[in-house]
Amino acid sequence: MSFLDLFRRHPKKPAVLTPYCACVVAAAGSSSRMGGIDKLFASVDGIPVLVRTLQALSASPYINEITVVTRRETLLDVGALCRGACLPKVTQVIVGGDSRLESVYKGINQLPAKVKLIAVHDAARCLVPRAVIDAAVVAAARCHAAVPAVAVKDTIKEFDGEFVTATPDRSTLRAVQTPQVFRAELLRAALQKAMDEGWEVTDDSSAVERLGATVALTPGNERNIKITTPLDLKVAEALLQEDAL
């Protein structure tokens, strides 16, 4: 039995006992590459992207509650969307900050004291499989920080200006996804340090790594795409239509 099979056998209850886990959903982006479309409300096979994301997270028995962090101008619409979709695990919708880091930081600081694990998920990853979520939470409960990842298919080049400076060994590279899951006190310390010192980080695990903590990699999934451009919407639609066949 594989690592992921462990989480497919019991769809309604956890296969492993874990501490109370809250998920912060980063939904405060500007959708700048969507050609004027707000990706949160864009339809994927008849269901808005954000609703699909929240449904996927809610399906995991390891996620106990969800906080959505969004822009001030979409606060009321996101709240109405969550209420209309009947998502009882969504406990609050709050206003984020000027950056993803600030938005996640605000989200984790609104969580109750009983939260021991914090998952951070991109709102635009609406096709995340339950097994990916479950594996990351269980691993974080064991080793404090876990990030789903997939192998890199393309050859990666480092460059300076217009010239290649290095070609890293592709076998040592991984593309990370979300949800990224951490012990609550570790993530709070890392993001506080990042805010105080103005660190440029592209994901939450980068801040945790800079504190010197070890981050485990768990199995990601190529279907766990991030909706960034209109083409990604078409890819997501195609994947769902493939499931229906």
Image (cartoon, helix red, strand yellow):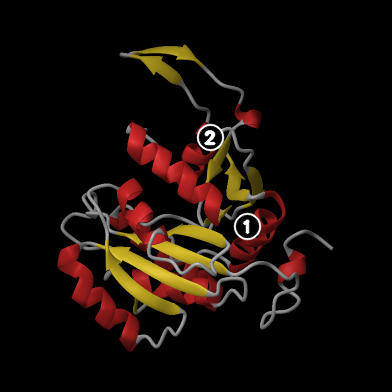
Q: Position of residue 191 (x, y in %)?
A: 42, 44
Q: Position of residue 37 (x, y in %)?
A: 20, 62
Residue in front for this viewpoint, 105 or 60? 105
Q: Is residue 98 above or below residue 5?
A: above
Residue at the spot of label 1: 136
> The N terminus is located in which quarter?
bottom right
Which residue is found at the position 54% from the left and 36% from the top?
Answer: 209
Query: In the current view of this chain or complex, which residue is farthest to the right?
Result: 1
The amino acid type of the residue labelled 1 equals Ala
- Residue 241 appears in the figure: no
Q: Position of residue 179 (x, y in %)?
A: 52, 57
Query: In the current view of this chain or complex, which residue is farthest to the front?
Result: 113
Q: Are marks 2 and 1 in contact (CB under 8 Å)?
A: no
Residue at the spot of label 2: 211
Quadrant assignment, res 169: top right
Residue in front for this viewpoint, 233 or 215? 215
> The C terminus is located in which quarter?
bottom right
Q: Is residue 52 left or right of residue 98?
A: right
Q: Is residue 1 above or below residue 148?
A: below
Q: Is residue 160 left or right of residue 128?
A: left
